[in-house]
Image: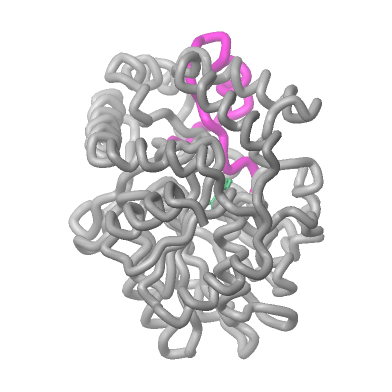
Amino acid sequence: MNNIIEEYQRKFARFFGAERAFAFWKGRVALYALLRALNVGAGDEVILPGYTCVMNVNPIKYAGARPVYVDIEPNTFNMNVNLLEEKITNKTKVIIAQHTYGYPCEMNTIINIAQSSGICVIEDCCLALGSKYKGRMVGTFGRAGYFSSQWNKPYTTGLGGMVITSDRELAKRIESLAANEMCPPSGGEVEMLRMQLIIYRLFIYPRTTALAQGLFRYLTKKGAVVGSSSTSEFEPVKADDFFKAMSSVQARSGIRQLGKIEKNIAHRRKMAQLYDELLAARDWQGRNYNMDLSEPVMVRYPVRIAEKKEALARAAKAGIELGSWFECPLHPIETPLASYDYELGMCPEAEKASNEVVNLPLHPRASEKTVERSVDYITGFTQTG
Ligand SMILES: Cc1ncc(COP(=O)(O)O)c(C=O)c1O
C-alpha cells in the first residue's frame, strides 16, 4: 500500500484514538469489508434503521445476509431503541447504529441489548464525524465504526470510506480480506475524480449547488463523471469491481480535510446553533434533542415541512441549497424496496419522515448569511410535527 494512504489511515485513527483505520473507495465498501470480516453471510440477519440510503443496504445483501429494519424515533431520526429487542432473532449477527444527520444514537441502550444477546454492534458514522455521546466520539463504542467522505458528507474527498477499530482480531481479518480481494480503482476513474474535486473546490457554493447537482446527475448517466452510485447499484447485485481501494488522490485530499477538522466541527456547531435561534425566533421547532447527553456535529440541519415537493422544486431558483435525504426508507425513491426485504408500512415513522424532512446546509461554505436565507426560505412553508 502506498505511503500517502497509510498516512491518511494513521491520522484518521489517531483523531479517534482508535488503534487502526482502513481506507476504501467509498463508505459502502468500508461497510462491506467490515461485514465480511465479521463473517456475516447467508442465513444471518443485520439490523439497521429503516431510514437510510440503499447503498448502505447493498453490502448486507452482497454479503448474503438479510437486512432487518427498525423504525425510527421521530425527533432524532435514529433507530427507536424501544423497538430493537423485538427485531432480534437467533439469526441476528450485527446491529448497525446509524447516527442520522449527526445525532448520536442511544449507544448505552443499544450496546446493553446487543451484549445480552451476544450480538455485535457497528456504528454508521457517515453522517456524524466528530459527534460525541456522553463525552466520547461516535465510532468508538461498537466493535468498529465506518465513515464516508462522499460529496455531501462531513468532509469530502469526492468519494471515500474508512473503517476504524481497536479490535486487533477484526483488524487482522480486514487486512487479509483487503490483501486478497480488494482491487485498485482504474486510472481513468481516479483522473476523473481528481478533476471533479478541482471543480468542486472552485465552483460549488450554496447558491450553485442545486444547479451543479442536476448537471452532475446528467453527466453520471452519460458516464462522463465518476458518480456516487452507478445504475447497477439500485439492485442488490454486486459488481465485480465493487470491493475497491482508496486512491492517493482521495487520501491526499482526506489528509488536507482532516487538518481542518476542528474548524469544520466548530463551524457546524455554530451554524446549527444559529438555525436553532433563528427558527425559535419564528416559533419554529428546531432540533429536539437532549444536548445534556450528547454533542452532535450535524452534517445537515433537518426540518419537517408539509410542502416538501414544492419547497424542493422552488429551492434551486431561489438559490437555496435544500437537501432531500432520505426520500424513502431506503433512499432514493426509485429503489425496488421488495428486493431489499422492505415492505411499505414496516417503518411508519421513517415513511412519514421521508415525506416531510428536508435539510439545510451547515458545511464550511455555508455562512451566517446562508443560514439566514435558508431560514427565511423554509419558514415560508408549513412546519409539521
Ligand atoms: C447513512 C449512510 N451510510 C452510508 C452511506 C454510504 O456512503 P458512501 O456513499 O460513501 O458509499 C450513505 C450514503 O451515502 C449514508 O447516507
Number of marks present in the image shown: 0
Residue 28 % position (x, y): 60, 55
Q: Residue at x 36, y 73 (%)?
A: 166
Q: Nearer the viewer, residue 161 or 193?
A: 193
**Which range of residues does the magenta coloring cover?**
303-328
The picture quadrant where one finds residue 267 is top left
Q: Give the left or right position of residue 129, taking residue 44 as reference.
A: left
In the rendered image, the vertical position of residue 242 relative to residue 169, given as above or below: above
Extreme residue toward the front, this view? 2
Residue 39 or residue 100, whichever sits in front: 39
Q: Residue at x 68, y 34 (%)?
A: 226
Residue 144 at x, y percent in the picture: 43, 69
Residue 289 % position (x, y): 30, 51
Q: Is residue 304 visible?
A: yes
x 69%, y 59%: residue? 58
In the displayed structure, would residue 256 be above or below residue 115? Answer: above
Q: How is the image coloured?
A: one colour
263 shown above or below 236: above
Q: Is residue 370 left or right of residue 193?
A: left
The verdict on residue 11 being magenta is: no
Using the rendered image of the protein, determine whether residue 52 is visible from the camera's viewpoint: no
In the picture, residue 240 is in which quadrant? bottom right
Residue 252 is situated, as x and y percent measured from the top left of the image, at 43, 39
Does 323 appear in magenta? yes
Q: Nearer the viewer, residue 19 or 64?
A: 19
Q: At 22% from the left edge and 63% from the top edge, which residue is drawn?
A: 134
What is the quadrant of the C terminus in the image? top left
